[in-house]
């Protein structure tokens, strides 16, 4: 019998700041039985726009901005939604229930839903009480991901609602609601969180950044943090990304004049062992013909510049360098899967996946 699975999140002024909140909630709707949303006092029509989301329970809240600490406000609001999910599960006697957490700019890919379910089952059976997912942080548009040290490579986004031991503390959001505490064992999943917080209508993006700084910092320190943020922005290291996006994002991506899917190329040579990649992955490479070879020396000379080297030898790295590292730059980053690495190396050559 599958584990009971819910979702929880927070939201405020989603239209004003152009969050992809409807896409986020829709990406959850086929995975969970019910979503609990802490909806803050908004200045727009966010609440009325939520009517199309099924199985959504809204918890009306008022943000206490007198706290003058954005981190506390965000974790407080997250915990209101988490508590509502926990109370519902308790009322229904669902002691082994789990819940997925997404922020309003985070979206699940439809191809990962079964993986998420099975990994939560595996976490439950192996004594874990949280699950961490991989992160793709999109930067300035939908076709570049940020990878430098500032960006977290994986984060907890599924939690067990009740501790296994009655004496253990409950899991709760903390800090700026990026993560959770009071857990004992973490399960790492290859499921992906597509984070689109830095890709939105430019005027609303600027307004959101201004307001979030005011939420976090006193007026006399704002200029310092504005300058620090500008430096971070300039140093952002990005990679091309032309892998697939969650389908719920299609309309938004096209509306913003970004690329949802590249046109197919006629031919691509890939240097690597094709047996290391799933048939589904290989089928989705947008090429009329894909030829796999074991060595770069087996690629015809006229195709060397466009060839994709899945696994670089030392000589390959010298002769045919790639900007794609084996993982994100954070010291906490796990190595990317072979399929993620190849997706990024294909993207580097402007070859996409459907």
Image: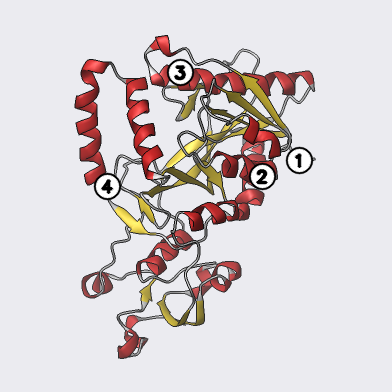
Q: In whole angstroms, how far apart are the C-alphas of marks 1 and 3?
A: 34 Å
Residue placed under numbered mark 3 in the picture = 73
Please tell me the numbered disc located at residue 172: none
Quarter of the figure that contains the N terminus: top right
Q: Nearer the viewer, mark 4 or mark 1?
A: 4
Residue 170, quarter of the rendered image: top right
Whether residue 162 appears in this view of the structure is no
Residue placed under numbered mark 2 in the picture = 117
Q: In whole angstroms, how far apart are the C-alphas of marks 2 and 4?
A: 33 Å
Residue 314, quarter of the rendered image: bottom left
Which of the two residues, 43 or 236, is positioned nearer the viewer here?
43
Picture residue at 34% right of the left edge, 57% below the top: 239
Q: Residues within 10 Å of mark 2 (few under 14, many from 20)?
A: some
Q: In whole angstroms, how far apart are the C-alphas of marks 3 and 4?
A: 27 Å
Picture residue at 37% right of the left edge, 74% below the top: 308
Q: In whole angstroms, how far apart are the C-alphas of marks 2 and 3?
A: 30 Å
Image position of 19 (left or right of 271): right
Q: Are marks 1 and 2 in contact (CB under 8 Å)?
A: yes
Residue placed under numbered mark 1 in the picture = 2
Which of the two residues, 123 or 62, is positioned nearer the viewer here?
62
Q: Nearer the viewer, mark 2 or mark 3?
A: 3
Q: Nearer the viewer, mark 1 or mark 3?
A: 3
Q: Residues within 10 Å of mark 3 (few under 14, many from 20)?
A: many
């Amino acid at each position: 019998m599958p584990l009971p699975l819910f979702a929880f999140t927070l939201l405020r002024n989603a239209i004003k700041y152009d969050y992809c909140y409807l896409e986020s909630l829709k990406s959850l709707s086929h995975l969970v039985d019910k979503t609990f949303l802490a909806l803050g006092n908004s200045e727009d029509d966010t609440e009325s726009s939520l009517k199309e989301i099924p199985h959504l329970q809204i918890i009306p809240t008022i943000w206490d901005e007198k706290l003058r600490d954005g981190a506390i406000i965000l974790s407080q609001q997250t915990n209101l939604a988490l508590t509502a999910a926990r109370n519902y599960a308790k009322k229904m006697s669902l002691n082994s229930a789990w819940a997925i957490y997404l922020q309003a700019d985070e979206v699940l890919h439809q191809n990962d839903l079964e993986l998420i379910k099975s990994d939560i089952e595996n976490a439950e059976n192996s004594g874990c009480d949280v699950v961490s997912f991989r992160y793709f942080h999109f930067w300035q548009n939908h076709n570049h991901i940020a990878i430098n040290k500032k960006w977290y490579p994986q984060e907890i986004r599924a939690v067990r609602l009740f501790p296994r031991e009655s004496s253990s503390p409950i899991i709760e959001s903390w800090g700026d609601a990026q993560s959770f505490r009071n857990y004992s064992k973490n399960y790492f999943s290859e499921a992906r969180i597509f984070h689109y917080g830095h890709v939105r209508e430019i005027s609303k993006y600027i307004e959101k950044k201004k307001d979030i700084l005011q939420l976090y910092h006193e007026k006399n320190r704002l200029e310092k943090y504005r300058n620090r943020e500008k430096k971070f922005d300039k140093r952002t290291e990005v990679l091309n990304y032309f892998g697939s996006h969650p389908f719920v994002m299609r309309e938004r991506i096209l509306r913003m004049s970004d690329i949802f899917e590249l046109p197919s190329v006629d031919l691509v040579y890939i240097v690597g062992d094709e047996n290391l990649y799933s048939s589904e992955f290989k089928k989705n490479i947008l090429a009329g013909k894909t030829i796999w070879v074991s060595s770069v020396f087996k690629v015809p000379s006229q195709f060397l510049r466009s060839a994709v080297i899945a696994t670089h030898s030392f000589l390959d790295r010298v002769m045919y360098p790639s900007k794609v590292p084996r993982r994100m730059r954070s010291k906490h980053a796990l190595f990317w899967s072979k399929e993620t690495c190849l997706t990024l190396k294909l993207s580097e050559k402007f070859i996409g996946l459907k």
